[in-house]
Amino acid sequence: MALGSGSRWREWATVLLPEIGLWPGMPVGVAEFTVQACAKYGKARTLYFPEDTVASAELFCLLERPDIVRRAARGLERKARNLFVVGEVDIAGGRLRGVLDGVVREFEISAMPPKMRRITVHEGEFGLEAMSLFVCRGGLMPGADAWKSYRHQAWNRMIALADEATPLLPRRRWRWHDLRHTYALQLLTYLENLMDGEEPDPQARRRRHRSYLSGHIRHNPLLIVSRRLGHASPETTYQYLQYTDDLIDEFEAAFASWVGDDEATYAEIASHALSGAKGGR
């Protein structure tokens, strides 16, 4: 979710199933929706999740999520009076209607803060079920401490599985925000390559970037990435330019040697990692 959208941790970690299109009656494909309460500074912006990202989330919902939901259903029933139990989902209007504290309430999804999303449930196959994409053992959306634990566990697995064929690991434990940076570099480099063609000289490419910025604002790669990341100023995104010339070849080589396919998507990379893990880890 992070690599496929470039969204911030609080944005992708709090996604509800109707937002990403994983809801009865909705076609699975590209997901595009507005976030506000979960966005930085509460500033409304549009999130875009490509089809491969949504497909990966759907796979999670088919294989792993049901078991977590089933085990937690009875516990959620006991907590029902403290939960927002949704009875009606207005997909077109982006609104949820249900019962909270014994009163019928209606909320605009984009205006729902993380705490509200965490207690939002509906009647599912096994009983009460969280409407968030990600659920923890308790059946509700994971909190900050849980996500920190997941990140540390992932780092430990990386260290344990590393061998002589593993690309150089970072010197410190990665952060969720680092995945946002990876997305930005990949997208920026892709757009720059479209603009630069076969230009081999980094200085010539940089001069072209500046010229392009003044003459073609709508199609400038830097501004496209800036809008996609939700940066308030292009100056924030400009920091990424220093990495695209120096490091992207190493990034591409690492992905290619790992997956064996230059055209592989992040979903395919994840599938490759899962199928290649030893001992079922």
Image (spheres, helix red, strand yellow):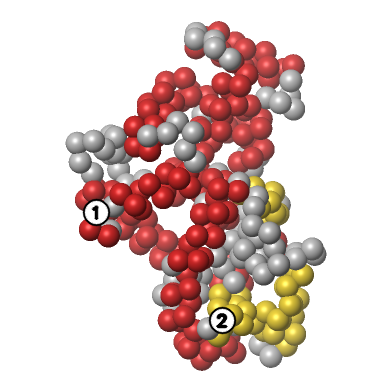
Residue 90 versus residue 177 in the image, above or below: below
Q: Quadrant of residue 147?
A: bottom left
Q: Position of residue 127 (x, y in %)?
A: 55, 85
Can you name the residue that lies furthest to the right here? 93
Query: Is residue 50 found left or right of 248 in the rendered image?
Result: right
Q: Earlier in the sequence, mark 1 or mark 2?
A: 2
**Residue at point 70% right, 63% down?**
26
Task: Identify which amino acid the numbered label 2 is placed on.
Answer: Glu
Which of 239 and 205 lies nearest the eye of the viewer? Answer: 205
As drawn, 230 above or below 86: above
Q: Which residue is depicted at the point 28% across and 34% down?
A: 168
Return the residue found at the far left: 164
- The residue depicted at 51 percent of the width and 29 percent of the height is 240
Residue matched to label 1: 278
43 shown above or below 135: above
Q: Secondary structure at mark 1?
A: helix
User: Tag on residue 125?
Assistant: 2
Distance in Å between CA atoms under marks 1 and 2: 33 Å
Specify few, some or many for label 1: CA neighbours under 10 Å numbering under 14, 14-19, or 20 or more: few
Residue 169: give x, y in percent of width and height: 29, 38
